[in-house]
Image (cartoon, rainbow, N blue to C red):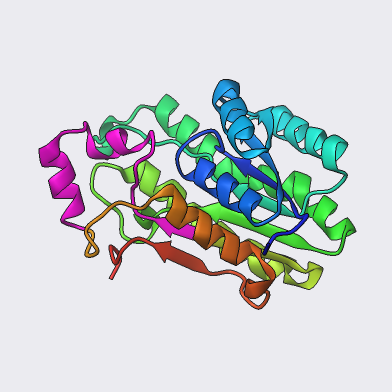
Amino acid sequence: MKLKNKIAIVTGGGSGFGAGIVKKFIQEGAKVVVADINLENAKKVAMDTGGFAVEVDVSNSLSFKNMVDKTLEKFGKIEIMVNNAGITHLPNSMENISEAEFDKIFAVNSKSVFFSAKYLVPKMTSIGGGNILNVASTAGISPRPNLSWYNATKGWMISATKAMAIELASKRIRVNALAPVAGETPLLKSFMGGDTPEKREKFLSTIPIGRFSTPNDMGNAACFLCSEEASMITGVVLQVDGGRCI
């Protein structure tokens, strides 16, 4: 029970890595808000795990604040924030990505981290500390071609994690990041530009351990970084990537 009675929000909790993090957190004793733009998915995960579903568009300030307010109404405090929700663009040369795609990717992947600072840092400070965990990607460390602006958002998230960690350490708020390689999530098909046995084989050939990241892998790593076992760890980017970035 590493997270016993901790109050956590997991965005993008309705599927993929987010659902894995929700499941692990609840197994370890946390009370978890399953936040997702797809409310039906959030409700399903909440029903399966015992979480509390909330609809959120993490790129929208009012929607993000509403998620925070609903969590406080339900549980009274927030101790863990997992910024897992993210999107990508289909593989394409950087000059051919539309401005609308660029704006949307940065709003979801980057602006959401800004909102977590804006709305949660004061709340965590008032209770003596907390944890913010940003789900970045190996794409922010070792970019793949034709995913340029997705790569850039994840690199931004890694820099933001370190900037937040150094500024918030005195407030006893730890800020870390996970950098997974692609996994069996709704984004996998987009990363590969289609899902075929040949494309999977080519993608897997870049991962030394020879498999994709799983929701369980992410749940275990997230639980560790948000637990007291990691109380001396802040500003790190933990690669959950099977050796992809070596």
x and y, in percent, of residue 239 in the image: 41, 64
Q: Is residue 239 left or right of residue 94?
A: right
Q: Is residue 202 visible?
A: yes
x and y, in percent, of residue 119 in the image: 77, 44
Find residue 95 and report its image quarter.
top left
Q: What is the quadrant of the C terminus in the image?
A: bottom left
Q: Is residue 59 visible?
A: no
Camera-side residue of 134 and 146: 134
Seen in the picture, residue 147 relative to 57 is either above or below; the reply is below
What residue lies at 65% left-to-right and 62% top-to-bottom?
Answer: 164
What residue lies at 69% left-to-right and 29% top-to-bottom?
Answer: 54
Seen in the picture, residue 175 relative to 202 is either above or below; the reply is below
x and y, in percent, of residue 185 in the image: 38, 38
- Give the extent of the magenta segment: 178-206
x and y, in percent, of residue 68 in the image: 77, 38
What residue lies at 80% left-to-right and 32% top-to-bottom?
Answer: 70
Q: What is the quadrant of the N terminus in the image?
A: bottom right
Residue found at the far left of this picture: 198
Seen in the picture, residue 88 relative to 23 is either above or below; the reply is above
Residue found at the far bottom of this picture: 232
